[in-house]
Amino acid sequence: MEEPLSFTRTSILHLPNDCLFIVFQFLVCSSDRESFGLTCHRWLNIQNTCRRSLQFHSSLALPNVSSLSQSGLVVSAFHLHRLLTRFQHLHYLSLSCCSELSDSCLTFLQFYPSKLLHLNLDCCSGITDHGLLLVAAGCSSLEVISLYRCNITDAGLETLANGCSALKHLNISYCPLVSDCGLRSVSQSCCQLEAVKISHCSGVNGTGFKGCSPTLTRIDADSCNLVPEGIMGIVSGGGLEYLNVSRVNMWISGATLAVIGAGFATRLKILNLWLCRTVGDESIAAIARGCPLLQEWNLALCHGVRIAGWQSIGINCNKLEKLHVNRCRNLCDLGLQALREGCKRLLVLYIGRTWKLSATAIEVFKICRGNVEISEEEIMFIGPGN
């Protein structure tokens, strides 16, 4: 006689961790993901292990990233200790605008198995060179760091470059204590560097970029004290695709920018010269000839560009899709005619508030180039993310 079959009662709690990890990964709804850990401590540990990003409500960037803190919370060493103990596999951490954050708070980055790739410390005025030392010691795999308006110097940048050689994106905009010496440390040590923002860094003239890696494709240098050697250094890597040198100082000769078209920026696709009032026809012609891949060019408020400059754009910029000429005092009917007869791929012309253009010239442009959108909007910042 056969013995009756026996059944063992099972439940989802008997699933191994590997299966629970897979279950968690299939949860698409954020509320479901947040509720997952309420089941039990084991499930909570699964949830904590799977978390890859953390951002505080005071942060300004990436509003869609998961956030755990309460509004108005002052981040202290205690908070970071608790968070980094709980979430040991973070890839993204944003502490931007945590003005009370001090260097000592970053000490805990050294004591956990950090896989941090992206760190945002924007407007953390309490972070200094010592804080960068702690970041370099604990985040050797870091690829992106934003230090907008932090009180750092060249010494901190050198430490960061030596400890985080995998760095790809660096933002040090509005860091007045930084000079080309610190920038040189980064550009020479970080061979995978792709993007650097140095806007409003009064101590930077651009020479720190000399001999930079060809992987460097984007530089924001708005309102910097650039010199001719500095501009040559900026394009020296040969891989630049986006360049913002808007609002260069008035004392810089308009011909200085001609080095952009000297042969090192042949891959350049987006160029922002907004409010570069001294740039003249010589520079425009050199850039138009030397940057054949240009797709968007902002020349708004560039009063030094005259007929010869517009003609060179029309003849040479065969891939240009967007051109900004707002408030250019010396754009006349002949200049617009040159753009109309050239720039065969032009899609949008930003042309609000011009002094020397007749209504007839604009109407003729619209008739002859009906596929080109005429916009009066003036855009200061162009390119990716703007």
Image (spheres, rainbow, N blue to C red):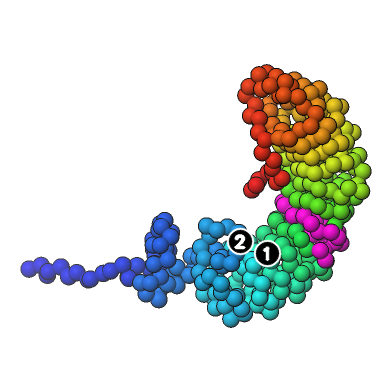
Q: Residues within 10 Å of mark 1 (few under 14, many from 20)?
A: many
Q: Is residue 84 above or below residue 237?
A: below
Q: Quadrant of the N terminus?
A: bottom left
Amino acid at the residue labelled 2: Leu
Q: Which of disc 1 and disc 2 is earlier in sequence?
A: 2
The residue that label 2 is drawn on is 60
Asked whether 198 falls inside the magenta stretch, the response is yes
Q: What range of the chain is rendered magenta?
A: 176-203
**Residue 42 appears in which quarter of the rendering?**
bottom left
Residue found at x 12% / y 70%:
3
Residue found at x 88% / y 48%:
250
Asked if labels 1 and 2 touch by Cβ distance under 8 angstroms, the answer is yes
Amino acid at the residue labelled 1: Asp
**How far across and down, in percent of the image, does residue 230 sit?**
88, 50
Callout 2 secondary element: loop
The residue that label 1 is drawn on is 122
**Residue 193 appears in which quarter of the rendering?**
bottom right
Q: Residue furthest bottom?
A: 78
Closest to the observer: 335 or 41? 335
* Label drawn at residue 162: none
Q: Residues within 10 Å of mark 2 (few under 14, many from 20)?
A: some
**How far across and down, in percent of the image, does residue 186 sit?**
79, 60
Residue found at x 48% / y 65%:
50
Residue found at x 71% / y 71%:
125
Could you give the CA–CA distance between mark 2 and mark 1, rounded to whole angstroms? 8 Å
**How far across and down, in percent of the image, does residue 114 sit?**
61, 69
